[in-house]
Amino acid sequence: MTKLCCVVFLAGLPMAHAGLLSVTLSFTGTGFVGATPFTDQTVTVQATVDTANVFTFKQNFEYDVLNALTVGVSGFGTGAASTLSGWYIGNNTGSGTYFFGNSTFGDYIDASDAALAGWEAQTPIGPIAVPDGQVLLNDSDTWGANGIDSSIGRVEVTAVTGLTITATGGVPEPASLGLIGLGIATVACRRIACRPRPNPRDGRRP
């Protein structure tokens, strides 16, 4: 009876499913928040996406719908984007090129690194330190007037150094799910096996 319970428990374990992936770009940047300039400040851009909504085209894995987008600049705070419409992030698995942009103006930033090759933008990765020479900003190294409108103002970046890319969350690895499920099933089976049995001599149930 104990073995049967274990089999049923394992069969009922959940399969891998989509989840929220948080992708963070962190770098030292120069630019503007509104009309106020900043120089060599820490800039953090974070996008949250649902891996159930990834769009694939050849070697591109792209999210055209973001769940959230924030931008922060040291000394100015962090603000949520005024709109999520048109924003996208993704990665080209063949070239190992991460891209972030807006459908109206095109890519704001492209970053190439061998560590990104094969990453399907659905699982955790990084932090990956991208060499400065492998980072390209829109409009000949400037976001120009096409910054990110946010609750702290329009954030425009004209120079980037020390870019790192990190992704957390996302789709659980099948192997990890299997190990977790096996551990839970083992505990359940042990409890069933160790459960006191009725004593036939006294006719009482435990």
Image: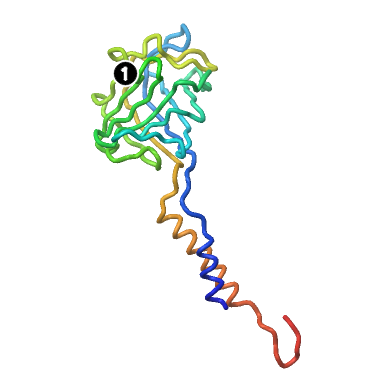
Under mark 1, the amino acid is Leu
- The colour scheme of the drawn protein is rainbow
In the rendered image, the vertical position of residue 176 relative to residue 146, given as above or below: below
Point out residue 41 in the picture as x, y percentages from the top left corner: 40, 19
Task: Give the quarter of the image for residue 121.
Answer: top left
Badge 1 marks a residue whose secondary structure is: strand
Look at the image and tell me in which quarter the N terminus lies.
bottom right
Q: Where is residue 146 in the image (x, y as percent from the top left)?
A: 40, 12
Image: 35 above or below 131: above
**Pick the front one: 90 or 43:** 90
Q: Pick whichever, 54 or 67, lies toward us.
A: 54
Which residue is outermost to the front? 57
Crowd tier of the residue under label 1, counting other residues whose Cα lies within 10 Å: few below 14, some 14–19, many 20 or above: some
Picture quadrant of residue 192: bottom right
Quadrant of the frame with the C terminus: bottom right
Label tally: 1
The residue indicated by pointer 1 is 137
Q: Which residue is drawn at 46% across and 6% down?
A: 35
Query: Which residue is located at x 49 percent, y 18 percent?
Result: 75
Left or right relative to 12: residue 94: left
Q: x%, y% of residue 176?
A: 43, 55
Given the current orientation, which residue lies at the most extreme bottom position? 201
Quarter location, residue 188: bottom right
